Amino acid sequence: MALDFETAVEGVPSIRGIFVATMPDCLLYDSWIGEEENWEAEEVAAYVGDLVRANRGGLRALSALSADLQVTVESTDTQLVIREVRNGDFAVGFVFNRDAPLGVVRLQVAQMLDHIRPQLPAPSPQERPRGVRVIEFLRRYAPDPGEALQNVSQKTGIPLATLETPENLHEFQLESLEEAVRDVLGMEQLDI
């Protein structure tokens, strides 16, 4: 499904491109790139996961981790704003000219997101078992997903092989799994 970016970018002269990536796999879902640009949205989307994970790690170290993440990166000629949407299932990146005032950029990002967000598919929680969603959340937000999964296995006593197929977890295992994931990620609750 192609997203309607043309309407979203109307009246935003400093926007150079928009990309939407699926998370945590960082595959390009859709994009809009200005005519004068020569970068590839697929390549940019591939790095989004690393950027989001690194920022989550920094926020965790500051005890400021939240489910609503916005990353802003400024370079000599570019401003990049990345927002997670749909409970972290997507990351939307906005590429602006560097000379656009940051306050205006933030306002324009909010306005464009208001247009783009309803167009994105909303995954139905009923489609994926809770154990699957908890493990996906851990892999998405842990700085080192492999090590985090091992820590969860040790804390819960659930073998790694069982955690690899979380759709088969029993109810009592789900409770200890969620508690261990919250502990490993330093979060009071999981937004899944």
Image (cartoon, helix red, strand yellow):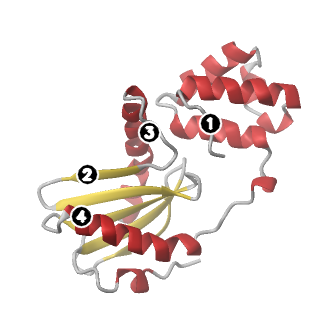
Q: Position of residue 47 (x, y in %)?
A: 38, 48
Q: CA distance from mark 4 to mark 3?
A: 25 Å
Indicate the quadrant where residue 148 lies.
top right
- Residue bearing the label numbered 3: 53
Q: Position of residue 8 (x, y in %)?
A: 41, 80
Specify which label sits upstream in the sequence, 1 or 4.
Answer: 4
Q: Say few, some or many: other residues with alpha carbon within 10 Å of mark 3 (under 14 / 14 to 19 / 20 or more).
A: some
Specify which label sits upstream in the sequence, 2 or 4.
Answer: 2
Q: Nearer the viewer, mark 1 or mark 2?
A: 1
Q: Is residue 120 left or right of residue 28?
A: right
Which residue is pictured at 28% across the width and 78% down the height? 34
Could you say which is closer to the camera, residue 131 or residue 114?
114
Q: Nearer the viewer, mark 2 or mark 4?
A: 4
Q: Nearer the viewer, mark 3 or mark 1?
A: 1
- Mark drawn on residue 189: 1
- Mark 3: which amino acid? Arg
- Mark drawn on residue 103: 4
- Residue bearing the label numbered 2: 73
Q: CA distance from mark 1 to mark 4?
A: 31 Å
Q: Position of residue 128 (x, y in %)?
A: 77, 50
Q: Nearer the viewer, mark 4 or mark 3?
A: 4
